[in-house]
Structure formats: structure tokens, C-alpha cells
Amino acid sequence: MKTKITQSIVANMQATAKDLVLYDDALPGFCLRIRPTGTKIWYFRYRTPGGPQRRLVLGRFPGVGAAMARQLAMVAAGDVARGIDVLAQRREVAAENLRSRQSTLKTFITERYEPWALTYLRTGEFQLERIRADFAEWLDKPLADLSPWLIDQWRKRQIATGMAPVTVNRNLQRLRALVAKAVLWKVIDQHSFAEVKPLRCDRTGRARYLSDTEERQLRDALFAREQRLRRNRVSFNRWRDVRGIAPLPLRTAEYIDHVRPMVLLALNTGMRRGELLNLQWRDVDIDGKWLTIQGATAKSGQTRRIPLNVEALATISGWKLQAGRVRDDAHVFRGTSGAKLTRIDTAWRKLVKRANLQNFRFHDLRHHFASRLVQSGIDLNTVRDLMGHADLEMVLRYAHLSPDRLTMAVEKVARSALTSAPTADLAAQQSW
């Protein structure tokens, strides 16, 4: 339908079962679309040279009246006459406004990076928390302003507080990954992190493991803890009996709680704490003597199988027998309420203190497992497979533990030198 579009005509137009389009006969391309819902939308239609017809939204009635809509259409018509694609121009302006709004670190995290991280990163919540804490002073800065000089000054301040270079590199890597996403998503054009080299640090890292004496201390402390808890229950029942309170069941089971089986399993499999806490009974094959670490819960994201040695098999078998009938999807280690266990920090700290172990974390049980493998002559590639590392770099920290590896190497050099030496030199060496 064509007519001179006026305010009164638009106000009186009624919706129909289908979209109704009213074209203005005075200004080509200027039109009004009336939806079956009653919504009235102003448009300007135009065609780019050699291109398809385009439709520019001018606004909605009655928010935008007929006179204002006509004025906007005339401006758009003038731009089209000068060769400007007004729809593309509007999109570019909108994109630039979005880029400007999201260009600060705080806004980009909140509007773009956080939803992505919580969906795709297994430790997304932790990563976001660390970025906000480590770079709090930069939250209001535009991402494009994070220059190499600014980064270097931040690193100097972190080192001055006593932070290890490897920790500084790891913290900065989180921000590097975030800014790389900003470039990928066209929020900023580029970033200068490529010009920032990691700080030099000991790539071998910390590999704390137990000596034979320390391992005995730990095992003794595990046993003594359970004996003490059994005695405490007896003593507590005496106290209740004096007061006429019904006694609690005696602790006669093989394991008092989850602590001893978790520690023994970690010692014999090298599983991470998170892998132990996420382990379900469906992942335990007692007959086949295997444990399966599901990729969804593994740090590497890759599923791996760990064979159970004699002690590990006896531990998990005894723990399952004590647990009774359990569903396949039940977690192997659960709290007193039956829910999935999430922490063992308090019990672990007390155990380490009683065992008189210095500077020893739960994660170091994993290092201890790897060190025993290497000391037994197991090749590093097999150690890598059992530990679930993506490459050999992390395993190389244990290479020095290989029995007589360095001694054998230098002895080969000596034998080679003796073999190639002239006879007179050999005689002289023998006379020494």
C-alpha cells in the first residue's frame, strides 16, 4: 500500500492477520511495517550498487513519530546517494561502541570472559578469582593499554614481595590467555604479550618426596591415628554411660574413616587429590586390578588407567567391603553425611604434624610415587603415562633419581678415553 504517511494515518492503522507494509509515495524507500501483534516499525529500504536490497530500522511507533521517522529516512537517503551503506555503517558504529564498552579489563571479564570460562574451563571459577585478585590495580584499564613496560613493572613488584618467578609466570599466563581471547573475539586488535618473555626460573621445580624413614613415620602416624580414635570412642562411651546416655558403636572396622585409604592409594597410584575425591566406584575394577581416571576430572583432560599394586588393591578392596552395597555412580570417598568429600585439609595437617614431616603437602604423595618408580629403574615415558602428564617436561624433575644414571654416564666417558689412549699413555696411567 502506498500513501503519504502521516501521524494520524499511522495512529489509526489496525493490525491484520499478516504483516502489513505501508509505503510512502513521497520518499522512496520510507515505509512502515505493522505486525499482527500491533507493533509498528519504521524502515528505510535501499539498494547498494550491484548488491541486494537492505532494510534499515528507523525506530518504533509511537516512540518515533511520523515526522521524526521521515527525517531519519531523508538523512539515510542522502547518505545512500553519496555511496554510503548506512546499515553497514550502523553495524560498525555499534560494534565500535561495544568494543569501547568492553575494552576495560573489568568489563571484558564480566561480560565476555567469565561466561566463557565458567562454561569451558574446568577451574574457571578459580582462574577468574586469581585474575581479579592478581591484577586488581588494572581492572579499570583498557586492555589495549597493557603494555610490556606496565607488565614488567608489575613483575618487579611481585618479585620484590618474595614471589617466586615460576609463580609470577603462572599468574601472568592467566592474563595472557584472557587477552588472547579479547583479540580472537575482536574486542581489541592486538596485544603485546608476545613481546613479554617469561622470567627465568628453575623449570625442574619442587619435587618433595619421602625418605624411607619418613615413609615409615607417615605409615606409623596413620595407624596410630586410628588406634587413638578407637580408644577415644571407648573413653567417650564410658563418659556417656556414667550419665545414662546410650553408648555409640565401637569403631571396629578396618578403617576408621577415609584418611588412611586415601593416603595409601595416593602413595601407590600417584593420583592427584582432586582425582581421588572425584573417583567413583564405576571407575574401580577390582577384578581387573585397575583404576580409571576419567578425562572430565583429570587435570590433563585425558582419561588414563592405573594398575593397582598389591597394597593399593588390598586397600580399595577393604574399603569397598567396609562401604557395603554402593551405587556405581557413588563417590569412593564420602563425608560423614554420605555426600561427596571435598576437603581433607584439617585431617592431613594433623597427620603430617604427628608424623613429624617437614614441608610435606598432600600433593607430594604424588611426587613420592613418581620418585619410587624412577628409583626402581622405570623409564620416564612409562612414568609419564602413569602420572598422566601430557609430555616429558614435568617428569624430567625426577630424572636425577634414576639409579647411578649420572655415574654410569661419566664412567662411559672414562672408558672411552682409556680405549683410545696411546699404549705409552696407558702404561703411564697404570704406573700411577
Image: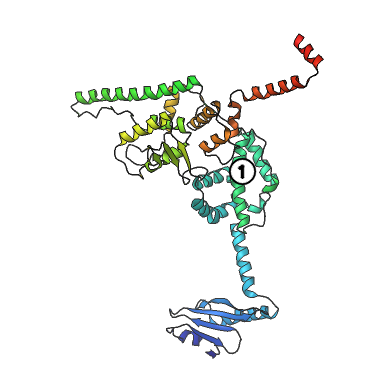
Q: Quadrant of residue 424?
A: top right
What residue do we see at 31% from left, 34% from top?
321
- Front residue of 423/164: it is 423
Image quarter (top left, top right, bottom left or bottom right) of the C terminus: top right
**304 left or right, relative to 94:** left
What residue do we see at 70% from left, 77% from top?
83
Residue occupying the far top of the picture: 431
What residue do we see at 67% from left, 57% from top?
189
Q: Position of residue 143 (x, y in %)?
A: 63, 52
Q: Position of residue 414 (x, y in %)?
A: 72, 20
Q: Position of residue 410 (x, y in %)?
A: 69, 23
**89 left or right, relative to 260:** right
- Front residue of 310/298: it is 310
**Visible in this render: residue 226?**
yes
Q: Position of residue 259 (x, y in %)?
A: 39, 31
The image shows residue 7, relative to residue 138, as above or below, that is below
Q: Quadrant of residue 276?
A: top left
Amino acid of disc 1: Leu
User: How many dots with numbers?
Assistant: 1
How dense is the environment of label 1, judged by Cα within 10 Å: few (below 14), some, or many (20 and up)? many
**Visible in this render: residue 205?**
no
Write down the residue under mark 1: 172
Task: Kindly state the secondary structure of the residue where label 1 is placed.
Answer: helix
